[in-house]
Image (cartoon, rainbow, N blue to C red):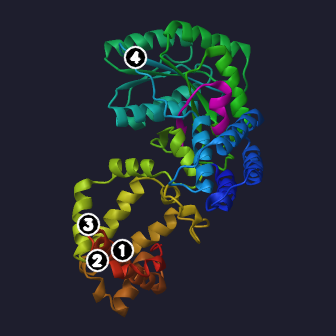
Amino acid sequence: MAFEGLAERLQDTLTKIRGKGKVSEQDVKEMMREVRLALLEADVNFKVVKQFIASVKEKALGQEVMKSLTPGQQIIKVVNEELTALMGGEQSKIAVASKPPTVVMMVGLQGAGKTTTTAKLANHLRKKHNRQPLLVAADIYRPAAIKQLETLGKQLNMPVFSLGDQVSPVEIAKQAIAKAKEDHHDYVLIDTAGRLHIDETLMDELKQLKELASPDEILLVVDAMTGQDAVNVAESFNEQLDITGVVLTKLDGDTRGGAAISVKSVTNTPIKFVGMGEKIDQLEPFHPERMASRILGMGDVLTLIEKAQSNVDAEKARELEKKMRNMDFTFDDFLEQLDQVRSMGPLDEILNMMPGMNKMKGMKDLQVDDKQIGKVEAIVRSMTKKEKQEPSIMNASRRRRVAAGSGTTIQDVNRLLKQFEDMKKMMKQMTGMASGKGKKRGKGLGGFKLPF
């Protein structure tokens, strides 16, 4: 997860102060020193850090403590609010032109992931906003970029406008916008040329393109892995083009996260989207308050709910709840659940969104890879229909057959069967508790482990 080091440092610092009934000025000073070091280590711009610390200090010491919070909790609340404000305060949505099509210019340096991000954004607009975008290949200096965009368009079953690499980007954009009007596209996403570094020629060309296309949105794509350099690139592009928003890519990598925290403050331009992986659907709208919450270990329940709502069938979920209550949950249901959870994204990413999950014993080092899940799946798929419905009939010879058929060991099969039974018991207890019954039976739920 992005921000891992920063999140850990901040959470450890906040834990020390959380339960304090009284917080002295010295406590706040010490805490702020720790927070300052954590932010600087995460590559946050030093001016931004200075301003942030001053603001938190002033509010933490000058505020009346709310009756419902301890002084320690009050300071955490202030840190959360200031971190949210630093990253933009509230979500900044993509522009919508009063008269379609909405023209979006995608700009940035070579290697930041601009072409892929253009396709990801088109996919997001169609999936989440029911829009019909037209992709435009205007990077004529890198024929591979034109080919890449065409390949991505084919993958998404989405039109790509291209005039090859012998026509000027300005002419390509002009004809693309006319085509979009003719074919009733509501968005035109122009993939422009990048360079390995900022130069005058690149900027002049982008300015000409901006003049002709009159874009409603100029989105700068920056690689979050480049840390402070990402902020400098954003500053330069903003000075020349007046960008309207930033898309941070590779935020899922081993990045210190400083770019995400500094970019808004330094350029006064909002982060509109973040790339959380290489897959075509791994582009998310940026919510400053949710990101602050994740950094401070409070989870990101809203994103989790949204992921569940768009990937989980509500009718099936109701049926499953009924089965769980009646203890009719079978291995077939288990496979279905596995598929639904998988469709929400990588499991470790989902676990990271749950409040306090990274602080649970053993969770920090939990590596959930597809091979482990694949092993569980192979075992279940090697069972007969009757065995999936009634795991109790799994005697020694059946277990041997399933292990051989799934390429696993008898111990793996035994472990899964035992954990499946434990899971059924736990589900029974949880549904019982949810319906107001069986309150005394909640004991011992903590012993359950993931069945892979």
- Amino acid type at circle 4 is Ala
- Circle 4 is placed at which residue position? 97
Q: Residue at x 74, y 48 (%)?
A: 32
- The magenta segment is 261-276
- Circle 1 is placed at which residue position? 380
- SS for callout 4: loop
Q: CA distance from mark 1 to mark 4?
A: 51 Å
Q: CA distance from mark 1 to mark 3?
A: 21 Å
| Contact (Cβ within 8 Å) of mark 1 with mark 3 | no
Query: Does 270 appear in magenta?
Result: yes
- Which mark is in front, 1 or 4? 4
Which of disc 4 and disc 3 is earlier in sequence? 4
- Amino acid type at circle 3 is Glu
Q: Residue at x 69, y 33 (%)?
A: 230
Residue 388 numbered mark, or none: 2
Can you give x and y, in whole percent of width and height, for residue 321 in the image? 26, 66
